[in-house]
Image: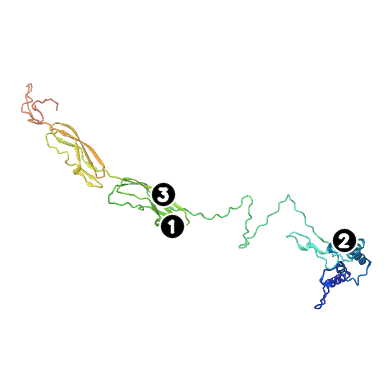
Amino acid sequence: DQQATHTSSYQKKMQKPKASKGSQTKKEKGKNTVNDIIDQALGDSSTSTSSEDHAFKSATNSVLDSDPIATIAKALDTPAAKASLAAATAAVEPPKTLNDNSDDTASVKPLTNDTADTSQTDQGKTNDDGKTPTPVNPIEPVDPDKPVNPITPVNPDNPDNPVNPVDPVNPVNPVQPEQNTAPVLNVLEDQTVSLSHSGTFDKLNGVTASDKEDGDLTMAIKVTGNVDLSKEGTYTLTYSVTDSAGQTTSAKRVITVANDLPVISADDQTIEVGTSFDPLTNVTASDVQDGDLTKDIKVTGNVDTTKLGTYQLTYSVSDHDGGQTTKTINITVYAKDASFSGLDALTVQQGSTPDLRKGVSVSDPYSATPSDFTVTACDT
């Protein structure tokens, strides 16, 4: 009550009275004096009659009033001022503690296990000091040598099927998102094609593409490179296809354009001596690009049909693209075997010497002495 009265007096002192218009004095318009500040701190000077207040004012007036804060601090540093402050401090009622036995004392609940029965603590039983409740069964400390069973989480969707706890040593690998599969490009093997002056090469013939996610991508295949069938050479084609996920597969293929050489048809021959012989008879030549080239065949070599023996002839032909083919064959000149006549059965008498040449003749147009033959006897 004393503190409240002093505070009320201080608040009233700090409130400024309303002044009528034109009635303000020079003092009210100027700065507050040191005594005014002291009066505001101690209350109304007309009612402050204690010796401590007078001593405080007397000490304060001896200090210059240019710094009010320093003035008050110095004034409080006196035995009388300190005694006044000590008396005021002793009059303040200390706050209540939790150990007080009053009705508004806070209730302290002892810490227990989650699985412990709350009825084990008697809320009405206290210690000898009458302040702190004593639990009936105190909590036993955890034994570090005895492992604690882990709590098995329950599956909310199926309470009868609990969720397996996570093994810290072998954790379950997280589900990895499915990786996109690159397209598959099917390209034919390297190929050699014939030179052609009028044909074209289909670069996509037999080439397909497919993708696990996108399906058939044959129509999305792109090809770089060209093949000129009219010119011999090697051409490289690059195939590529890209799926919807941006993965690209590529492949290369080599196409060789080659000129087909002419083909000469000519076989070895055997002719009878003395007969006529034409080296181009039954000999032909053809070309894929140029067609029939028989009239362009050239022959080297000679055959003497009057003499028995084997002769070689070489045929050659060239196409319009410079491709040349040669072929060599053998021509054999032969003679027919000699023919005998008059070889009839012969009967002779025993002990006689017959003429074995009698009545026998030889026909051999290729022999100058056809009658010169040998007779050899043989057993029958």
User: In the structure shown, which secondary structural element does the residue marked by tag 2 occupy?
Assistant: helix
Please, which residue is most extreme toward the right here? Answer: 51
Q: Are marks 3 and 2 in contact (CB under 8 Å)?
A: no
**Between marks 1 and 3, how big is the CA–CA gap?**
19 Å
Number of numbered tags placed on the structure image? 3
**Between marks 3 and 2, how big is the CA–CA gap?**
99 Å
Residue 282 percent across, percent down from the top left = 18, 42
Q: Amino acid at mark 2?
A: Lys
Please, which residue is most extreme toward the bottom here? Answer: 20
Q: Quadrant of the C terminus?
A: top left
Q: Amino acid at mark 1?
A: Gly
In the visual, does 126 lie left or right of 368?
right
In the visual, does 366 lie left or right of 161?
left
Front one among 64 and 252:
64
Please, which residue is most extreme toward the front here? Answer: 26
User: In the structure shown, which secondary structural element does the residue marked by tag 3 occupy?
Assistant: strand
Residue 244 percent across, percent down from the top left = 46, 57
Which residue is tagged 3?
251
Q: Earlier in the sequence, mark 1 or mark 2?
A: 2
- Can you tell which quarter of the image residue 373 is in? top left
Please identify, in this view, whether the residue under mark 1 or under mark 2 is nearer the observer: 2
